[in-house]
Image (cartoon, rainbow, N blue to C red):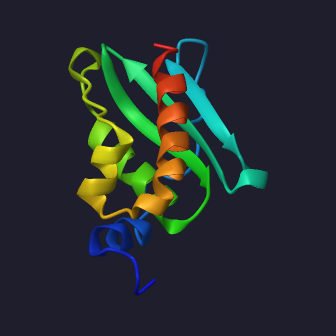
């Protein structure tokens, strides 16, 4: 872990948003989206709980490197509680720059983006 950027190391050691959201009834407001394949090294699924035009909860399940998991955690933390009409997801290249993800890992961030956008299109 010594070659990881400090922000990635910090996020990777506290994956508080990892897991699933349980569906509590028919009107639970749960939406999900996934992308990638484990056989290719990265698979991500985001689950969102929406109510009153807000992302109340954001959870993810991810198979991948520490950069993948840390980026998912950062996105979950950043988006949870946001109003739907004010979502600012950004682009994978911006995430990489902000978190210190090496350029060689950009393909993994594109998988994360695909999964997140798949969940958000369910809104």
Q: Residue at x 29, y 18 (%)?
A: 84
* Front position in the image: 107 or 98: 107
Residue pictured at 31% horizontal, 32% vertical: 89
Residue drawn 45% across and 21% down?
120
Q: On the picture, is 95 further left or further right than 102?
A: left
Question: Does 64 sit left or right of 4 as displayed?
Answer: right
Asked if residue 64 can be seen in this view, the reply is yes
Which quarter of the rendered picture does the C terminus lie within? Answer: top left
Horizontal side of residue 114 vs 53, given as left or right:
right
Relative image position of residue 100 (x, y in whole percent): 30, 64
Q: Residue furthest front?
A: 104
Residue 9 rendering spot, x and y as whole percentages: 37, 74
Please say whether residue 77 is visible from this viewpoint. Answer: no
Q: Quadrant of residue 26?
A: top right
Q: Residue at 24% x, 21% y: name it.
A: 83
Rendered location of residue 113, percent (x, y) = 47, 36
Against 8, is 111 above or below? Answer: above
> Most extreme residue toward the left, as rendered?
86
């Amino acid at each position: 872990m010594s070659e990881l950027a400090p922000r990635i190391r910090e996020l990777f050691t506290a994956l508080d948003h990892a897991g699933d959201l349980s569906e509590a009834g028919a009107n639970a407001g749960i939406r999900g989206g996934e992308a990638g394949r484990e056989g290719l090294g990265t698979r991500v699924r985001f689950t969102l709980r929406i109510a009153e035009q807000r992302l109340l909860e954001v959870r993810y399940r991810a198979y991948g490197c520490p950069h993948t998991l840390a980026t998912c955690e950062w996105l979950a933390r950043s988006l949870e509680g946001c109003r739907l009409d004010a979502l600012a997801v950004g682009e994978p290249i911006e995430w990489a720059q902000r978190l210190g993800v090496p350029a060689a890992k950009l393909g993994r961030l594109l998988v994360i983006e695909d999964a997140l956008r798949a969940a958000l299109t369910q809104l």
